[in-house]
Amino acid sequence: MEFHLCRDCFCFMGNSYAGQLKTTRFEEVLHNSIEASLRSNNLVPRPIFSQLYLEAEQQLSSLEAGSRADNEEEEEEEEEEGSESSSPPVSYQMKPPPEGCCTTDGFCQAGKDLRLVSISNEHIEVPAGFLLVGAKSPNLPDHLLVCAVDKRFLPDDNGRNALLGFSGNCVGCGKKGFCYFTEFSNHINLKLTTQPKKQKHLKYYLVRNAQGALTKGSVICWKGAEFRGRQSSSSTCSGTLFQLPESSGLSGSTSSEPLPAANPSAPAGTQQTAAAIDHIPSTAAFSSAVYNGKESPKQQLVKNNLSALTRPSVLGTLTNSGPPKKRHKGWSPESPSSTESWNLQLNPQAPNRIKNDGGSLSSLPHSALVGPASSPMVGSGEPVSVPDNLLKICKAKPVIFKGHGNFPYLCGNINDVIVSPLLYTCYRNSQSLSRAYEQYGASTIQPISEEMQLLLTVYYLVQLASDQVPLIEDLEQIFMRSWRESHLSEIRQYQQAIPQTFPQVPSQIAPVTSAQLPWLAGLAASSCNDSVHIIECSYSLAEGLSEMFKLLIEGKLIKTNYVVIICASRNRAIDSCIVITGKYQARVLSESMLTPSDYQKEVNYQLVTGKVETLGSFFSTLCPEGDIDLLLEKFYQENRGHISSSLSASVNKPTALNGTGTAACTSYEIERHQIRPFQLAVAQKLLSHICSIADSSTQNLDLGSFEKIDFLICVPPSEVTYQQTLFHLWHSGILLELGLEKEHLTKQRVEQYVMKLDAEAQLKFKVFLQNSMQNPHTLFVLIHDHAHWDLMSAMHTLYPQTELSTGLVDRLLNCREVKEAPNIVTLHVTSFPYALQTQHTHISPYNEIHWPSSYSNGVDLYHENKKYFGLSEFIESTLSGHSIPLLRYDSSFEAMVMALGKRFPRLHSAVIRTFVLIQHYSAAMMAVCGLSQMKNYTSVETLEITQNLINSSRQCPSGHGLMVVLRIPCTPLAAVAYERLYNVRERLALEDNFEIILGNPNSGITIGKHFVEQLKAWQKIEDVDWRPQTYLELEGLPCILIFSGMDPQGESLPRSLRYCDLRLINSSSLVRTTLEQELGLAAYFVNSEIHTEKAVVNDVLESDPEKLSSTDNEDEEVATEGSTSEKRSPMKRERSHSHDSASSSLSSKASITAFCSESSPPLIAAGDTAKSSQQVLSNSAEETTNNYERQKQKVDKGAQTTISKHLPPVTEQLDTKQNIKSAQISITSSSSSPFSSSSSSSAPTHNSFILQTSQCSMTKASKQPPIVFLPKLVYDIITSTDSNGLPKSSSLLPYHSVMWASSFRPLMSKMMTCTEQSLYYRQWTVPKPIHMDYNNRNEGRMDTFHPRRLLLSGPPQVCNKNKIGKTGAYLQFLSILSRMLIRLTEVDVYDEEEININIKEESDQYYCQPGDMWPDLETFKKMPFDYTIHDPKYEDASLICSKLQTINSEERSMSRRQEDMYTRRQTTRMRLSKYAAYNTYHHCEQCHQYMGFNPRYQLYESTLHAFAFSYSMLGEEIQLHFIIPKSKEHHFVFSQPGRQLESMRLPLVTDKSEDYIKSPTFTPTTGRHEHGLFNLYHAMDGASHLHVLVVKEYEMAIYKKYWPNHIMLVLPSIFNSAGVGAAHFLIKELSYHNLELERNRQEELGIKPQDIWPFIVISDDSCVMWNSVEVDCSGDRKSDYMWTERNVSLKQILQHIEATPNVTHYALIGMRKWSSKTNSAEIKEPFSCCHVHDFIMLNVDLTQNVQYNQNRFTCDDIDFNLRVHSAGLLICRFNHFSVMKKQIAVGGQRSFHIKSKVSDTPVSISPAQYICAPDSKHTFLAAPAQLLLEKYLQYHSHRFFPLSLKNYSHPVLSVDCYLNLGPQIAVCYVSSRPHSLNISSSGLTFSGLLLYLCDSFVVASFLKKFHFLKGATLCVICQDRNSLRQTVVRLELEDEWQFRLRDEFQTANAKEDRPLFFLTGRHI
């Protein structure tokens, strides 16, 4: 007896193993209590006896933790593994391993590998009675360790009968006989920190799969509570229960045999468990007919050591986010969720009921369940038996939504019910406050109560219409609004920053109590005509469910759609569930739980097993004359000869017309490829984003290093999409433009650039990756088109048995090679970007590009003649006032489907809908062909479509017709439809009238030969083998395109598309992407000239008025001319009550009656038949709506046809029986062909439908959007709006593989931009584990964005020939990106001819041979100096006269046209060579170190050094500063003790090395820290060189930032406003001073002073490339030579010049400025003695006494050249070398702006205002005096020297300086220094004298040597007025010059700015 009592206890509690004594349980509880006491720090553990005996009162152990003691040990395991408890767990000290043994995780102590992945294919000896199991190690969460365990110590199928203790073997080393699990866990290195328990660590059985590999099998179900059906002890409830889907990553089966599979479509071996589980097939628990096992996503362990919950719940895929079940762990409401599998529910608030039932389970958001639990689940409490034959009696499977509390067991006929966790999930989520509301305080604002949740649910169900289905999203928003409204005052208080001590504000709404709940719910349901039935239970939900089943069986719930069962009592929390009993609602909800894969399997199963045959036979019997096929055959036999002849005449007629040329359709236009304005705008936005990435400091994209573009376009595995992309690519010309292909382009070459994501994709992608690695200087753009397709994770493929392409995108585009390649940019292109905009997306929000809006504030931004017609425009057309809507549903069709759904409850609705629609199309074709009796078996909509399709080709002389797209997602059903419609068409002899095409994504297009010939004729194609490969090429072809495939894959449709029949789309799969994708098929670009809205109204005016008036709603308005609906204010427009376009109650009446009868087809009343026939006539006589100019016909009493625009209402037509009779006669008459094309006839029997052939149907269709037919359910969702005015479809879950992050999310706003929508989804959606972005969350938040990944989203648009949309945009982007890269590799260099060539002295004497490499010193000394300036940048400078020159003023002015004076200098674009100098934007790998960027992109360390020297002319010591990077310190000498800078190292003259440049290079620069060409790494060809940037003090920091590895010479602050002369002056003086220091230093080393290298290079910051002329003098005569110019490195040029013989005898060495117009004469003389500019080598030793003028801003190089020459020094220009100068628009001289010193406002100041009279009130200018002087003299010197203007034979004498007096005045330079070289002035008479800052060398006697014209003018310039007077006196100027007081001037400077003073006089 005692034993039986124990068994009874076990049966109810399930807490003991067989044979286990109660004392064991007592010891266990005692142990746990003691342990809890040790751990606890704030809470008191429950007493032992409370744990033992209070729990005994509960009769059944609940899967949702209703029983605490029953699951105590399991809770212990969960919390030790995963809870974030506030108390640390008790540490467990493992026995130390033996010395020398292996301690590696995954290996045993003998060093053998135990990991399943490693030994899965090895043969393992398993002793008899042992099983292989998988053990989990805490250190290897992703691995299982293989162990062999005696199965006696493992539980049986019911989780019982496991012997205490352990017996196991090590499969690695073979060691046997482990008797303790502790010992065994040590041996296999589990390294546990808690007490080893076999229940905790032995997790899975291991089994062999079909390939013989060892894989993870079912879970080891310790304690019998997991995943097993239970057998009740009650004999009345015996039977097998439903298997549970996986929960928390675990699964099991009801059989002891591993992996049972009863369903033939689910092969054994597909079941996988735990984290790898992908699919739950049906098991033995299900009938083989229809299995309801659903797929469920894998449960991933949370990264922060949270373990998945090991107990399942009634809801299937659920995890625990509530408090732990044991109080002693110290959980508080503020602590995070203990086991949060999805890591989403944030700080859930524990409802009050936790205290009562000991714990509560939460679930995922419902969207997390790919296939939610669909079978009744194991529950708690009294079992409930499901009645037999429930499905047969009720005609639908009831769907039970578990609500609150405990759910009872179900047993019996459990295949006829479905249990879903969605509502439970919604309730739990709505009770978890999101992070957004934590700020309001968790203690004061509580979540919405369970009672209120249930009451709001009842309210929601009550207001649903009979044809509506409840949506979880609606409920979530209702809960959200209710919570916000009830806590509005609290929220406002907290938003006003009230202190935390603020008392709780009582809610204005009194809370609903559990006692009130049933009464309030019943009251709410009392007004709904029993649509919602409330059942109140007093004890448990079991009695309510039993009552509900009883009522169902008794037929008392026929009118009831929803049964709400409530079990509420005062003492405990409520239990509830909601049962969907409405046949329509239950069917939709149960089918919505199928995944796309299951949906296809289910349909395919029903087709394969013949379950649809009953449906087919039912349709066949509908015909009044018997079998439809017999009727078709009879019609075929009777009309075979007649129809074929008349049809051939009809079809051939257009061809004959075309042949004669009398009538041919001109509407078939092939638009040439062109770029639309908004495509160009998008392309430019893409380019802008690419540039932004390149410009960012992260250096993730170095555009400067790329020379060309390559690309690969990835498209879904649709053959049509693939061919379509090839077509666009071919015709875009982009391959030729990018230089990727040559002129003769073949299709095979184009195919290299488009990759179909199928099984062969990996090979092509591997080639792409190899190319990217082999070509680092090519930028590869990886374009992922239709990017929302296949976002499956490669690691978590949900459908392993499906096609290979699943998860391919993740495997390829997210592979490591693509992510890390610096030269691959990934561009995702899609119309539905939502799935790529989650919290874990790879794409930065800054890298998103959205399609621009065409209009802004009513302004057309892009002047586009095409207007987009998309989803919003379709919805707009459904508003009343728009008349006939473009978006419709078919109520007749829906009624028939609903009737058949009740008749065939076991068939999937997709099967029923497809067969009904096939029947409709078949009947419509038969009716059009004259079988009038079939018109009752179709709908008006289908008849309209068929009528217009068949007649469309007759309205065009060329036979153009319409396309009808029939969308059938399920491929097997599409094949059935194709076969049936094809046969009907053949029987009706319509095979040459229109084509039926089966559009399968995996195959190409197949059409008949006749239609191929038609297309070839229309498109003027002569290729014999041509076949259409894209739907676009079917333009004008009359056809039905059966479009199959679960999702469209980017196929574009032609402009001739007229009807888009979407009645068969999966309306139960309600996600935003799917809906918008299906509707996107009809999206259209229409000509903006056509005003669509107006056209739609006209359509009504000219259409059948009775078509609208005969709709289901009698009160619907007919929009006619002047109707109120047309004049209604836009704000008051409402949606028409019904838009099932022509679904009349009359026409559908007979059809519905036929389908509703379950015995035999009814006899239709004659009156109904007549009405129906007249209705069908009036609607099917309607022509196509393409141009909205319909013309209708009416058959009158005398059978005369008349055309009428406004027909009387149908009621008037039915007034007389004559009309009815004549109408019937006209339709049924078959005495002549129904295809006669005459538009009018006097004979009543000529044809049944007489249409006017007014215009080509295709032309009309191409001008308007297509008409779309939707399922009623989808139509309602699309056209209804939420509280924000947004279509409800927008608030749906965006994509299958993402889920909402929280129920507490705001609604989307109607005014949201695309960017705001993106941010919304990024905040409120997270990917599921099956999503490829799921694992993109491990690193820091910002690090998850991939820097080279962009997203382009644009509207769906497929109905156009020219691909106006995204494809054209990204191809254009490739084009402009390529051009930009080329532009980046090109520079604008100055390309100007040398000036003043005609003045150059022509001499027959050539001093050197053209091929000479170096000048001969002695010969060169004989060369005269060419004073003339030839550099074109000095075109506006004064000419320098060297002797008496006879220059015509006309000749001089001819060379400088006035209009060219201030125009932009001439440039040419040159490709950068590998020897170019670069600015800061260049970042190639070779010069990274040179530039000073280390891998962390930190600035190199550098030091600041002072360097001082004295200069007598300045009268003070000059102190310069060097900034020297550590990497450049070897160029300098430092004193040892103090590290003071002593000198810059200089080489020896005799040094010769190929590896370095001897001359230090100095580059003065200002304002060009970004654009200056200071990167000489490539120019120097990697040679070692010393490069110093000379910068002003205020620019030091910015230059140091951009050029951290360059040496800087910082000028003193007094030179901050100085010009280039000061920089040159200091460079030269410093260099000479350094030369002296080096000579002294090296002299101590025994080196002669003259052996130190004396040259420096002074280079402009715009020198970009250098060229060398190679002369070939191999001709017969010496004068014959050939020359070529090529780009060379600066290293080669400098080393060549440095190797010049006697090089130290030259003072200045330079080179030509490059020009493309250089002629042979200019380089015939290889060396010239003339001016050198821009890039010079300066001998600082020889030029010691010749200085740059530190005050100069312009022409300082000319001035210095003249000084050097006059000093008798040699200036040599190498004419075979030339320098290219880049045009840089910023910095340099442009950085000097002359503005007023008084006002900061920029005012234009003319040069005439640069000087003024002394002591005047002239406005002073904020500019250096020297700059004002030079600029004034350049533009207004004729005021000082009037006689000199254009008087080139009488120049101005300029002493010791050269100042630019403008191009129309010549100057003659003389030096006053003794022994200087000057021109012979004898015979020269000067027109003026310029004395600028004369020094003591200028004396009176020197000036008296020169002769001046009478009236010549003098200008003396001095530093102050005193010096001016002293100079006049000292030089005795008053002897020959006359001065006046008013002739004194000064620069317009304030006194503190030290102006310069002028004195002018006239020669006496």
Image: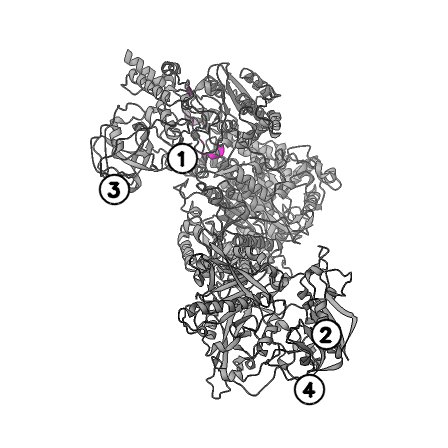
Q: Is residue 776 visible?
A: no
* Residue at image mark 4: 1883
Q: CA distance from mark 1 to mark 4?
A: 103 Å
* Residue at image mark 2: 1929
Three-letter amino acid code of the residue under disc 4: Gly
Residue 1346 position within the rendered picture, expressed as x and y whole percent measured from the top left: 48, 48
In terms of sequence position, does the residue under pointer 4 or pointer 3 come before the other? Answer: 3
Residue 588 position within the rendered picture, expressed as x and y whole percent measured from the top left: 51, 32
In terms of sequence position, does the residue under pointer 1 or pointer 2 come before the other? Answer: 1
Q: CA distance from mark 2 to mark 3?
A: 114 Å
Residue 1730 or residue 1622, whichever sits in front? 1622
Specify the quadrant that holds the N terminus.
Answer: top left
* Residue at image mark 1: 301
Which tag is nearer the camera, tag 1 or tag 4? 4
* Residue at image mark 3: 122
Which tag is nearer the camera, tag 2 or tag 4? 2
| Span highlighted in magenta in the image | 363-385
Which tag is nearer the camera, tag 2 or tag 3? 2
